[in-house]
């Protein structure tokens, strides 16, 4: 019985520590471009003993301000590093054996279908992490509608670095832009009504913040962030 009580105490302590960690992470995120809302309020402080629901500010998200970029870097950088390690590993065998080193190149990211852009900062992080010498130039902003053939961004530098980054960068862009595009379809369908399109917490493991960000790029609103979030 004493062993069971000890185990229960340890579990409770571990849970409290995890809650503290989450609240600290959310506090940091809020200072980097997120706004807090409790219940039906707008930007107000949460009442005591209640966790405030945090949501992206769509105007900030689409404006390309430093706060949102910093938040996306804090959330996205670990994912980018893992994705590159998963894809590149010890090196790009094909590029190393086929192409000469120090060959300058220019790559353009172009939309192939109509859609809404999301994830440009994550693509930038991917290119930077693959090769810090590469230059990345955005040609659009998250939240913008794209027509087929529209230029999204371009990268300039060593061709080896570009080829190392391109697939991972495109994977992030296509996934997040797909969410934004699909969200926009529903938002447009209820335009002129009082209906708001909300997301859920049924997200890809590890991608929750990025996927919820993509929802706001499509004009949707973030709802429940996690199990501990009542709103």
Image: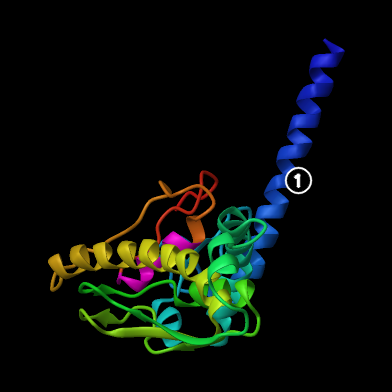
- Left or right, 225 with reference to 132: left
Q: Position of residue 156 (x, y in %)?
A: 51, 88
Judging depth in this view, the residue of 47 and 58 nearest the camera is 58
- Left or right, 63 with reference to 7: left
Principal secondary structure, stretch drawn in magenta: helix
What range of the chain is rendered magenta? 210-219
Q: Which residue is mark 1?
A: 17
Judging depth in this view, the residue of 5 and 161 nearest the camera is 161
Judging depth in this view, the residue of 82 and 68 nearest the camera is 82
Q: Position of residue 60 (x, y in %)?
A: 45, 82
| Residue sticking out furthest to the top | 1
Q: Position of residue 54 (x, y in %)?
A: 51, 64
Image quarter for residue 148?
A: bottom left
Q: Quadrant of the N terminus?
A: top right
Q: Residue at x 27, y 63 (%)?
A: 183
Judging depth in this view, the residue of 91 and 224 nearest the camera is 91
Task: Residue 150: tell me if it is visible.
Answer: yes
Number of numbered discs on residues: 1
Q: Residue at x 80, y 28 (%)?
A: 9
Give neighbour class at mark 1: few <14, some 14-19, many 20+ (Cα, 10 Å): few
Q: Is residue 57 above or below residue 138?
A: above
Q: Is residue 194 above or below residue 138?
A: above
Is residue 217 rendered magenta in the image?
A: yes
> In what element is the residue under mark 1?
helix
Task: Residue 33: tell me if it is visible.
Answer: no
Is residue 55 rendered magenta in the image?
A: no
| Residue sticking out furthest to the right | 2
Q: Is residue 48 above or below residue 73?
A: above
- Left or right, 95 with reference to 6: left
- Left or right, 95 with reference to 23: left
Q: Position of residue 45 (x, y in %)?
A: 56, 69
């Amino acid at each position: 019985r004493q062993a069971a009580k000890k185990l229960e105490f340890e579990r409770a302590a571990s849970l409290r520590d995890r809650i503290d960690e989450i609240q600290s992470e959310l506090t940091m995120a809020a200072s980097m471009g997120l706004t807090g809302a409790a219940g039906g309020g707008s930007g107000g402080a949460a009442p005591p003993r209640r966790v405030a629901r945090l949501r992206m500010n769509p105007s900030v998200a689409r404006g390309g301000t430093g706060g949102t970029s910093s938040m996306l870097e804090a959330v996205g950088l670990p994912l980018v590093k893992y994705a590159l390690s998963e894809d590149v590993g010890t090196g790009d065998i094909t590029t190393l054996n086929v192409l000469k080193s120090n060959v300058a190149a220019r790559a353009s990211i172009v939309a192939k279908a109509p859609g809404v852009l999301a994830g440009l900062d994550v693509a930038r992080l991917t290119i930077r992490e693959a090769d810090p010498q590469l230059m990345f130039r955005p040609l659009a902003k998250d939240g913008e509608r794209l027509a087929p053939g529209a230029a999204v961004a371009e990268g300039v530098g060593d061709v080896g670095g570009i080829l190392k980054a391109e697939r991972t960068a495109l994977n992030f862009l296509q996934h997040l832009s797909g969410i934004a595009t699909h969200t926009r379809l529903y938002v447009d369908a209820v335009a002129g009504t009082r209906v708001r399109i909300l997301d859920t917490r049924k997200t890809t493991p590890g991608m929750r913040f990025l996927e919820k960000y993509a929802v706001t790029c499509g004009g949707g609103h973030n709802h429940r962030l996690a199990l501990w979030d009542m709103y």
